[in-house]
Image (cartoon, coloured by chain):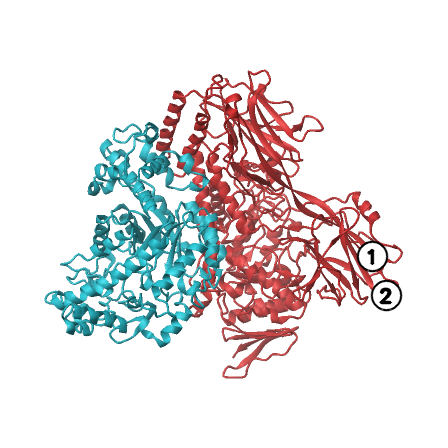
């Protein structure tokens, strides 16, 4: 740890070791200059070069506990440059074994590099790589991309997608779907018994349903094959790996099926505990709790997908079943299953990549509809037992912290004022809530925008980047015609450039605050390197 | 990475680093190179960039030919039916070394900078100095005492000194510059030029720089390497801030203070160094391919003997043909050894090395009925040698033709360079970025650099956008949305008029001769209008070096061979009176200079826009521009304007505005828009808000072995990409459609007129509202005839374009010819039925000898000798007009 602190200092002061031509970003110099040249003789933070020479060492703990007034580091003095900016590659950038729109991707990469982005995010699909049969992997297209990214001098955050995509259509592997034809209980089912074919049910994680292997084993083989295929890139070009955790890669139940039409109030969603294996687990749990009758099915009085939460009595603001002992029994079990599933996958990823210098990420959804009600129906059906009376993201953050993983939070472009009033939605409050839980447990947060987009989205993103909701990186979704369109791209350029300009007045901060800035940033950096070493 | 020899430092103040870097030099291209040579610990790599240019290097027929002929490997020369020698030009990489050395001169007082290069060439060091306290990025001329003999001053900021071999046996061409370190000189800046090829070893002002400042002369042995590097890392710190516009001044003062503090605290000395790197220059090498045909007296077969002095593996890609059409066929076996069949279209034979000399060759035995022998040479995966962009052709039936039938003096084949587009871009960017790193300078520069980076980013984004966009909807969106716009929309979208426009090209190549064209045309205004034309394109109005007007000089002087400015105004007024819109032909790509610079190169402009050489692109060595590199292709006859310069764009926008105001032009025909990025056109059009604008984006269609490909998607994609770059503010001439009509009509291959999706195969099939269809113009036809429409088939062409979507353009010569009444009838059918640029085409027949289509379900047409009659269904069709091999019906 000591080493890492000093290393990060010397990195920051000694640009010549770090900065080749490839670092000609809009941001970098700013960082150094702000940090060190402005206050080279500040008492509390000596010129690190000199410090390094005299052998003075400050451990990471010291930096953390003594120097950083955690919650007091005022947002005003925070600079944005340390948030590493990524852009997501098109979901279907690879199909079969080949790269689509090769020329566009390569031009795009160059543009992003020039713009000063840290790197790109690459979705790697289970259904593409292990398409034909179990254990037969085709990484070729993705390897091409990794090479292109490396050549462009960018970093790569890889997302391992164990789910399907509806638009563009990328299904699960054919052989998995074949198995699902006869054994539909490998999928989540809703109350009507309709299976969700976008990912496997978490209840089969450890059941040998895939040709004698459990999904966990299959995921592990996939990760290991990935690791060996990309060994040349991991730790250098590939700096982050995001583990797919469920529908759309997010840690959640598929409580909403299909896309909600814009302009309509989304329903509460449905609980997804009706596949044979989930029901079995529920039954076991109920019996263990001495309430066998509670284990026969999900809540009978929950509304259907598109119905308003008030359509039935489960989510009622006052006196709803959610507040009853049964409600607590069910919701605790339902959410703990989800967290256990996340835990399994993230610890799998952490152990597979334990010897690689990469960050592991997992994505948590922002179920912000109905956040204004007491019961938070959308969160409950998605598997987060977070209500007006119970802080539910604590367990989630703990689980991430336990696995030394960072969290990805989408929806950073959503602001309250553009939400439909009727949906009692509050993306900002929810984000702050999750952010606080993560900060408490030292879980790094990476942000994403929602794929649907939002009015004034870039503004909101910037706002979030300035707040504590975000402290690791931001992944902008996603490159494509829309992204480079004349209506959008100039705005994006402007956004990136603005990120690197200080907030008003920060240049005139008194010495004390300036010091805080420096320490704050160093803290973040050392934190990062510690993570990399312990990972 | 650089290897640093530190121990030598103690004995002798010389630093050696040998970065593994290569510099590529390409003769016809601007070479930009800038390397972190100052940064021994950085990822010192050398990057360079080049823009592919189309320069043809002529290899003069030399005496070596005769030598080759003499050695020709033919047993008896009596029965030779044919022999010929084709000179070919190819690019060969020659590797050499380039070094920079800073050391004490012999007397130990002064210092000496030596620059050397081991490659053959006429090397010139183009250099200058900067003085202590200089704030700008400009160079100054070095003091007289510093200039080596033979130096020539260039303006007031640089001198050029040739590199010389000290003695005959030397490997290196060298130049030595002596200087006194106690002088006020802060740094020596230079770039290297190869006069022979025009290659520059420079990057737009980001030159090699040898800083001399902050060093003290003594104290030599006590200074360690690290402090010596301090200066360099200072440069890097600067660089890291380069992109921060708003903070620039702040950052600067910070860095400066650090640096100056450093320099006070530590005594540094001028350290010598020696740095060497390999340099690769691409030189064009002339080789010869000799072919002889003889008849074997024994077998009666024809033997083709092919031989060349091109080194390395050479593959002959060959076939035979039956007639003059030169259609490739594979002859019957036997084939020479090492022959493979390529895609059933051709054979490939690896030439076998000859026992004597460095030559290789092969013998091909063919049956005598073949008409000709066709081949191209393949040097490697991407390098082909062709004969003037065509296949080499050897007649087999023709007897005893004389060598040199192709006119050897200028018969030079061109190499098709394989450098892909993207490579060019990536190099450019790297170059840009690395260029930044080596620059240790000034705010003004920073801003420029930022701008150019932004522009680069925008260009890349535009490229990515156009590809993503076109791959989402392979047929661009407009076609999809067309059903909605079938109602006659009066809404005018900028640059495309009402959608019902019919264009008349109001001049030909000879129009300037009368010197009163404007007046002659004025007489015809009402006549042209009455034929149904709504827009007329007038010839380029500016003063021009060539009488036709395409070599403009003073843009504000509108007295030309076509008439005076007042006559022009009068003409425009008359045209407006008869209800026509008027397009001005504006040449924005290039401009002829008024004055020469010190080197005698014409690149200084006069008149109201008295630009200097900063307005000229840097990558055409002929014009020694100091601007940025061109954003498009180069036009070699005149200085190409650098549209990336803010002042140039501002001036041009003003000029276009003036033309609109003063002359009354309603829109533009934009000449040679391949020469610069479409994004600039967008800029100009947004500023001048034309009613209609059309760009001339003319490049070659794709051919395989001399035969036009059916699929011309890549060709029309390039045009669509350009339109896209302009953001749709301009249309473009549909060169694709013209090319396909050529093949379809000339060869009776009417099937070509439908693409794989059953749509028109030209730009008009993809983006009809931006396609300006035409069959002839002043370049392709008239007295130039660069690409003349098949004779006698013009009316079929017009029957096609005047009934189809797109905006049709009719050439002046055709209007005032015997075609006139037929053209007028076609126009009236078009107008009567409200066919417009977005009309829907349903192709009903595209067969060998007939093409038929129904447009907007109102007009049916067929061209070709084959039979077609529109269906006799609910619609009742009546024949509207009929001509040679075409018919047009309308619903009644």
**What label does residue B456 carry, if any?**
none
Near mark 1 (Cα within 10 A), the count class, few <14, some 14-19 or many ≥20, is many
Question: Which residue: 62% across, 50% down?
Answer: B417
> Which image quarter: residue B744?
bottom right
Colour applied to chain A: cyan
> Which image quarter: residue A281?
bottom left
Q: What element carries label 2?
A: loop
Return the x and y of residue A488 as percentages of the image width and height.
38, 54
Q: Is mark 1 on a helix, strand or loop?
A: strand
The answer to whether residue A225 is left or right of residue B663 is: left
The answer to whether residue B95 is left or right of residue A81 is: right
- Name the residue that disc number 2 marks: B300
User: Across the whole image, how many numbered discs are drawn on residues?
Assistant: 2
Colour applied to chain B: red
Return the x and y of residue B297 as percentages of the image width and height.
88, 63
- Name the residue that disc number 1 marks: B82
> Is residue A466 or residue B17 the one in the foreground?
B17
Would you place residue A272 above or below residue A404 in this image?
A: below
> Is residue B716 or residue B653 the one in the foreground?
B716
Q: Circle 2 marks a residue in which chain?
A: B
Mark toward the viewer: 1 or 2: 2
């Amino acid at each position: 740890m000591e080493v890492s602190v000093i290393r990060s200092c010397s990195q920051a002061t000694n640009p010549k070791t770090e900065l080749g031509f490839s670092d000609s970003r809009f941001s970098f110099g700013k960082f150094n200059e702000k940090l060190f040249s402005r206050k080279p003789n500040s008492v509390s933070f000596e010129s690190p070069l000199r410090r390094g020479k005299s052998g003075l060492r400050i451990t990471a703990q010291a930096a953390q506990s003594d120097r950083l007034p955690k919650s007091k580091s005022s947002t005003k003095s925070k600079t944005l440059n340390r948030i590493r900016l990524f852009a997501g590659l098109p979901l279907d950038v690879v199909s079969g074994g080949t790269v689509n729109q090769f020329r566009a991707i390569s031009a795009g990469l160059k543009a992003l590099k020039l713009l000063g982005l840290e790197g790109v995010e690459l979705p790697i699909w289970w259904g593409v790589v292990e398409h034909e049969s179990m254990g037969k992997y085709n990484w070729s297209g993705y390897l091409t991309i990794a090479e292109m990214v490396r050549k462009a001098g960018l970093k790569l955050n890889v997302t391992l997608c164990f789910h399907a995509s509806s638009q563009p259509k990328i299904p699960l592997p054919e052989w998995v779907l074949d198995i699902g034809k006869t054994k539909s209980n490998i999928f989540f089912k809703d109350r009507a018994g309709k299976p969700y074919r976008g990912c496997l049910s978490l209840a089969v994680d450890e059941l040998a349903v895939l040709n004698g292997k459990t999904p966990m084993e299959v995921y592990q083989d996939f990760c290991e094959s990935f690791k060996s295929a990309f060994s040349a890139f991991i730790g250098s070009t590939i700096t982050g790996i995001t583990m797919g955790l469920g529908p759309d890669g997010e840690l959640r139940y598929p409580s909403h099926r299909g896309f909600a039409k814009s302009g309509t109030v989304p329903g509460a969603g449905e609980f997804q505990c009706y596949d044979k294996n989930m029901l079995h687990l529920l039954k076991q749990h109920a019996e263990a709790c001495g309430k066998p009758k509670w284990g026969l099915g999900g809540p009978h009085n929950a509304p259907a997908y598109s119905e308003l939460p008030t359509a039935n009595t489960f989510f009622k603001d006052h006196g709803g079943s959610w507040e009853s002992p049964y409600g607590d029994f069910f919701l605790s079990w339902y959410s703990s299953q989800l967290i256990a599933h996340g835990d399994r996958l993230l610890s799998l990823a952490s152990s597979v990549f334990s010897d690689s210098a990469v960050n592991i990420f997992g994505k948590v959804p922002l179920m912000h509809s109905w956040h204004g009600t007491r019961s938070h129906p959308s969160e409950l059906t998605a598997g987060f037992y977070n209500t007006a009376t119970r802080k539910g993201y604590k367990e989630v953050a703990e689980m991430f912290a336990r696995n030394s993983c960072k969290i990805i939070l989408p929806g950073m472009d959503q602001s309250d004022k553009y939400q439909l009033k009727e949906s009692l939605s509050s993306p900002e409050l929810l984000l702050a809530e999750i952010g606080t839980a993560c900060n408490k447990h030292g879980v790094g947060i990476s942000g994403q925008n929602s794929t649907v987009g939002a009015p004034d989205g870039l503004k909101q993103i910037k706002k979030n980047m300035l707040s504590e909701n975000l402290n690791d990186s931001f992944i902008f979704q996603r490159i494509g015609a829309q992204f480079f369109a004349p209506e959008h791209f100039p705005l994006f350029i402007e956004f990136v450039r603005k990120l690197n300009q200080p907030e008003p007045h920060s240049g005139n901060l008194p010495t004390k605050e300036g010091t805080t800035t420096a320490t704050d940033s160093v803290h973040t950096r050392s934190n990062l390197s510690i993570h990399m070493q312990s990972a | 990475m650089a290897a640093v020899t530190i121990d030598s430092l103690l004995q002798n103040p010389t630093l050696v680093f040998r970065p593994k870097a290569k510099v590529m030099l390409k003769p016809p291209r601007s070479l930009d190179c800038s390397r972190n040579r100052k940064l021994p610990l950085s990822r010192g790599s050398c990057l360079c960039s080049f823009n592919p240019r189309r320069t043809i290097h002529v290899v003069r027929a030399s005496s070596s030919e005769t030598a080759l002929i003499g050695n020709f490997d033919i047993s008896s020369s009596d029965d030779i039916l044919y022999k010929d020698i084709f000179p070919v030009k190819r690019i060969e990489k020659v590797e050499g070394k380039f070094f920079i050395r800073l050391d004490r001169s012999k007397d130990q007082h002064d210092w000496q900078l030596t620059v050397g290069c081991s490659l053959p060439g006429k090397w010139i060091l183009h250099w200058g100095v900067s003085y202590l306290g200089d704030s700008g990025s400009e160079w100054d001329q070095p003091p007289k005492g510093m200039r080596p003999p033979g130096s020539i001053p260039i303006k007031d900021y640089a001198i050029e000194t040739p590199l010389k071999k000290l003695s005959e046996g030397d490997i290196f061409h060298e130049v030595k510059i002596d200087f006194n370190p106690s002088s006020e000189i802060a740094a020596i800046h230079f770039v290297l030029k190869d006069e022979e090829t025009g290659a520059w070893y420079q990057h737009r002002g980001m030159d090699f720089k040898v800083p001399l400042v902050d060093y003290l002369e003594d104290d030599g042995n006590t200074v360690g390497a690290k402090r010596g590097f301090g200066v360099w890392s200072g440069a890097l710190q600067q660089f890291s801030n380069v992109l921060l516009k708003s903070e620039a001044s702040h950052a600067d003062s910070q860095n400066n203070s650090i640096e100056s503090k450093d320099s006070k605290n530590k005594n540094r000395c001028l350290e010598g160094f020696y740095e060497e790197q390999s340099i690769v220059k691409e030189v064009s090498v002339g080789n010869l391919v000799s072919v002889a045909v003889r008849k074997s007296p024994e077998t009666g077969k024809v033997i083709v003997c092919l031989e060349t002095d091109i080194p390395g593996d050479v593959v002959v890609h060959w076939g035979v043909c039956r007639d003059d059409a030169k259609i490739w066929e594979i002859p019957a076996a036997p084939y020479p050894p090492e022959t493979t069949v390529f895609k059933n279209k051709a054979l490939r034979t690896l030439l076998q090395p000859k026992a004597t000399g460095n030559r290789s060759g092969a013998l091909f035995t063919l049956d005598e009925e073949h008409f000709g022998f066709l081949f191209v040479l393949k040097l490697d995966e991407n390098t082909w040698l062709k004969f003037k962009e065509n296949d080499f052709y050897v007649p087999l039936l023709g007897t005893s033709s004389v060598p040199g039938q192709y006119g050897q003096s200028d018969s030079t084949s061109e190499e098709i360079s394989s450098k892909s587009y993207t490579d060019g871009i990536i190099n450019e960017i790297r170059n840009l970025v690395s260029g930044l790193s080596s620059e240790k300078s000034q705010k003004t520069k920073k801003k420029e650099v930022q701008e150019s980076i932004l522009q680069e980013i925008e260009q890349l984004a535009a490229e990515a956008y156009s590809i993503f966009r076109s791959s989402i909807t392979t047929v661009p969106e407009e076609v999809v949305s067309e059903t909605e716009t079938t109602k006659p929309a009066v809404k005018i979208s900028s640059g495309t008029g009402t959608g019902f426009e019919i264009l008349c090209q109001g001049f030909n190549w000879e129009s300037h001769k009368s010197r009163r064209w404007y007046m002659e045309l004025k007489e015809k205004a009402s006549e042209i209008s009455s034929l149904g034309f709504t827009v007329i394109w007038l010839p380029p109005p500016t003063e021009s070096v060539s009488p036709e007007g395409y070599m403009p000089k003073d843009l504000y002087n509108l007295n030309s061979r076509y008439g005076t400015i007042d006559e022009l105004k009068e003409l425009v007024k008359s045209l407006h009176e008869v209800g026509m819109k008027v397009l001005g032909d504006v040449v924005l790509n290039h401009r002829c200079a008024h004055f020469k610079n010190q080197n005698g190169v014409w690149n200084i402009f006069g008149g109201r826009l008295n630009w200097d050489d900063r307005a000229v692109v840097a990558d055409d060595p002929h014009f020694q521009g100091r601007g940025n590199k061109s954003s498009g292709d180069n036009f070699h006859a005149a200085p190409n304007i650098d549209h990336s310069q803010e002042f140039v764009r501002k001036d041009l926008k003003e000029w276009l505005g003036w033309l609109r105001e003063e002359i009354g032009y309603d829109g533009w025909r934009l000449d040679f828009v391949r020469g610069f990025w479409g994004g600039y056109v967008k800029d100009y059009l947004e500023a001048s808000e034309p009613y209609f604008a059309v760009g001339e984006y003319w490049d070659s269609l794709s051919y395989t072995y001399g035969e036009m490909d059916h699929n011309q998607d890549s060709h029309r994609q390039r045009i669509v990409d350009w339109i896209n770059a302009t953001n749709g503010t301009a249309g473009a001439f549909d060169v694709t459609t013209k090319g396909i009509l050529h093949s379809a009509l000339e060869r009776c291959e009417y099937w070509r007129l439908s693409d794989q999706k059953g749509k028109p195969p030209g730009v008009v099939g993809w983006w009809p509202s931006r396609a300006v269809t035409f069959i002839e113009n002043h370049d392709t036809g008239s007295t130039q005839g660069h690409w003349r429409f098949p004779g006698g088939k013009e009316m079929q062409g017009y029957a096609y374009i005047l009934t189809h979507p797109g905006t049709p353009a009719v050439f002046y010569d055709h209007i005032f010819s015997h075609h006139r009444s037929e053209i007028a009838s076609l126009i009236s059918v078009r107008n009567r039925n409200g066919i417009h640029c977005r009309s829907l085409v349903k192709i009903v027949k595209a067969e060998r000898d007939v093409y038929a289509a129904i447009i907007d379900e109102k007009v049916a047409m067929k061209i070709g000798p084959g039979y077609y009659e529109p269906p006799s269904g609910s619609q009742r069709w009546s024949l509207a007009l009929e001509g040679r091999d075409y018919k047009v019906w309308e619903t009644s």
